[in-house]
Image: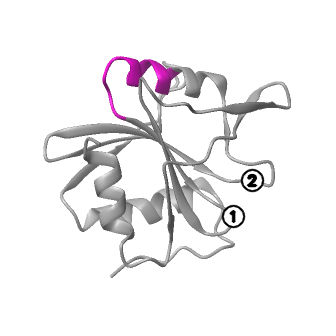
Amino acid sequence: MTPELRARDVDEKKFWAYIRALLSCSHVHMQRIETTTGPGVPDVNMCCNGVECWVELKCETRYGVLLRPEQNVWLLRRAAHGGRAFVVARMRNNDVAIWKYSSTARITYNIYADKYLQLSSLPNVAIPCKSKNILDTLITTLFTND
């Protein structure tokens, strides 16, 4: 059964609980990362069938999907070395959007409030939370080479 994420549930803690519940029924090992030693380290490390990825979780605000510059740099560096790095965001319209970082990705952003990067490029994938295919789409996007 697909867990439910209501439109008013906009904080990252609830979004993480939703993603964890969604992926827990599959063969995905997930580890939430809480670190103060390395700036920009993503929120979650995941592994499925020997394929590992790093995920920065975000919730869209009225200002968009915002990243700290250190988060963007970390994701870009990991992708430049062949790692799988993503931003997975809960959008205000209740979709789940995924931006894949890669050596060829053209992720664009605007500067917001002189300290945040506002993602302005379209996500690689946007999935309605109520979609019956959300689990398959997440696993395919995060763990399959394209």
What residue is rendered at 18% in x and 58% in y? 27
Residue at horizontal 33 percent and vertical 67 percent from the top: 135
Is residue 81 covered in magenta?
A: yes
Establish if 87 lies above or below 94: above
Dot 2, how many residues are within 10 Å of its Cα: few (below 14), some (14-19), or many (20+)? Answer: few
Q: What colouring style does the render use?
A: one colour
Residue shown at the point (66%, 62%) measured from the top left: 10
Is 38 or 47 nearer to us in this picture?
47
Who comes first in sequence, dot 2 or dot 1?
2
The amino acid on which the numbered mark 2 sits, given as a three-letter code, is Thr
* Residue at mark 2 to residue at mark 1: CA–CA distance: 7 Å
- Callout 2: helix, strand or loop? loop
Extreme bottom residue here?
Answer: 1
**Which residues are drawn in magenta?**
74-84
Q: Which mark is residue 61?
A: 2
Q: Residue at x 39, y 68 (%)?
A: 134
Q: Position of residue 80 (x, y in %)?
A: 39, 18
Which residue is denoted by mark 1 in the rendering? 92
Please state if 37 lies on the left or on the right of 116 as rendered.
left
When the figure is inspected, residue 134 is found, relative to residue 57, above or below; the finding is below
The answer to whether residue 109 is left or right of residue 97 is right
